[in-house]
Image (spheres, helix red, strand yellow):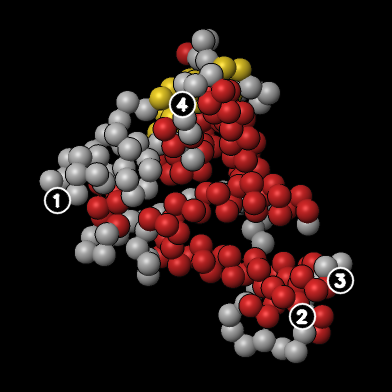
């Protein structure tokens, strides 16, 4: 449980969904779907920790929306979470590989911060020089790969072109980090080429303009 909370949940998922929670429309599927996922997780997690953190679990349980029983200790095992098969197209194996890539990229971003190449990850553009196998995996996320990596841009390139890029501990991956040349969107903090292209909202990127209440909204599939 400790590893799950610190690695997969705190170190990955909660970081990734911040953009969806803060920037997409309040009632959008992108925002409400991850709120639903968080609800399912907290329902399960409060029961998982109850035998060893009983007081904490009771406090969590009391604040979960919806009808509650007298005590979390009297609840049965939560069955609301569904499990994907390990070999599902975007199942456990897929996300485990993505998480390994993200951890490697995080290290390179930290190196770039220390070298004062960038001030933060959203000020960065990243090129991932990858093997054919890794290319096939990461390409499934499309443009949403940048949301997973928490950078303003991610490009995929063949591994053999990355001779001058930073090596990582992950086979088939080299990383090049550069500062984005584009202006920062004041709403989402991503540095995007289209910031300033809209006369009524000169400080916003096109994505954020679409996410304003009068906009068409944003569609997310993965991150």
At 83% across and 73% down in the image, what residue appears? Answer: 54
Instruction: Judge whether residue 23 can be spotted in this image.
Output: yes
Question: Which is nearer the N-term, disc 3 or disc 1?
Answer: 3
Element marked by disc 1 = loop
186 or 18, nearer to the observer: 186
Residue 222 locus on image (x, y percent): 48, 51
Question: Which is nearer the N-term, disc 3 or disc 4?
Answer: 3
Question: Which is nearer the N-term, disc 2 or disc 4?
Answer: 2
Marks 2 and 4 sit apart, C-alpha to C-alpha, by: 46 Å
**Within 10 Å of the Cα at label 3, are there few (<14), some (14-19), or many (20+) other Cα atoms?**
few
Disc 1 and disc 4 in contact, CB within 8 angstroms: no
Question: Which is nearer the N-term, disc 1 or disc 4?
Answer: 4
Above or below: residue 165 compared with residue 195: above
Disc 3 and disc 4 in contact, CB within 8 angstroms: no
Marks 3 and 1 sit apart, C-alpha to C-alpha, by: 55 Å
At 37% across and 58% down in the image, what residue appears? Answer: 24
Element marked by disc 4 = loop
Residue 116 shown left or right of residue 74 in the figure? left
Above or below: residue 126 compared with residue 54: above
**Which residue in the protein does label 4 denote?**
118
Residue 16 shown left or right of residue 122 in the figure? right
Element marked by disc 2 = helix
Marks 3 and 2 sit apart, C-alpha to C-alpha, by: 10 Å
Question: Which is nearer the N-term, disc 3 or disc 2?
Answer: 3
Element marked by disc 3 = loop
**Which residue in the protein does label 2 denote?**
72
At 52% across and 15% down in the image, what residue appears? Answer: 165
């Amino acid at each position: 449980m400790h590893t799950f909370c610190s690695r997969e949940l705190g170190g990955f998922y909660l970081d990734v969904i911040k953009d969806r929670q803060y920037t997409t429309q309040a009632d959008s599927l992108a925002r409400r779907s991850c709120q639903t996922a968080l609800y399912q997780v907290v329902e399960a997690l409060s029961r998982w920790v109850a035998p060893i953190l009983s007081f904490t679990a009771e406090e969590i349980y009391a604040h979960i929306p919806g009808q509650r029983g007298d005590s979390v200790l009297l609840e049965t095992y939560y069955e609301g979470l569904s499990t994907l098969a390990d070999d599902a197209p975007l199942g456990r194996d897929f996300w485990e590989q993505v998480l390994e890539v993200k951890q490697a990229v995080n290290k390179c971003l930290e190196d770039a911060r220390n070298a004062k190449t960038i001030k933060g990850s959203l000020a960065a553009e990243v090129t991932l020089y990858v093997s054919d196998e890794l290319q096939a995996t990461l390409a499934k996320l499309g443009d949403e790969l940048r949301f997973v990596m928490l950078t303003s841009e991610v490009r995929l390139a063949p591994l053999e072109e990355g001779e001058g890029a930073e090596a990582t501990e992950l086979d088939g991956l080299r990383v090049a980090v550069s500062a984005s040349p584009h202006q920062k969107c004041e709403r989402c903090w991503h540095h995007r080429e289209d910031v300033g292209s809209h006369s009524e909202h000169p400080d916003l990127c096109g994505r954020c303009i679409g996410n304003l209440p009068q906009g068409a909204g944003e569609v997310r599939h993965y991150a």
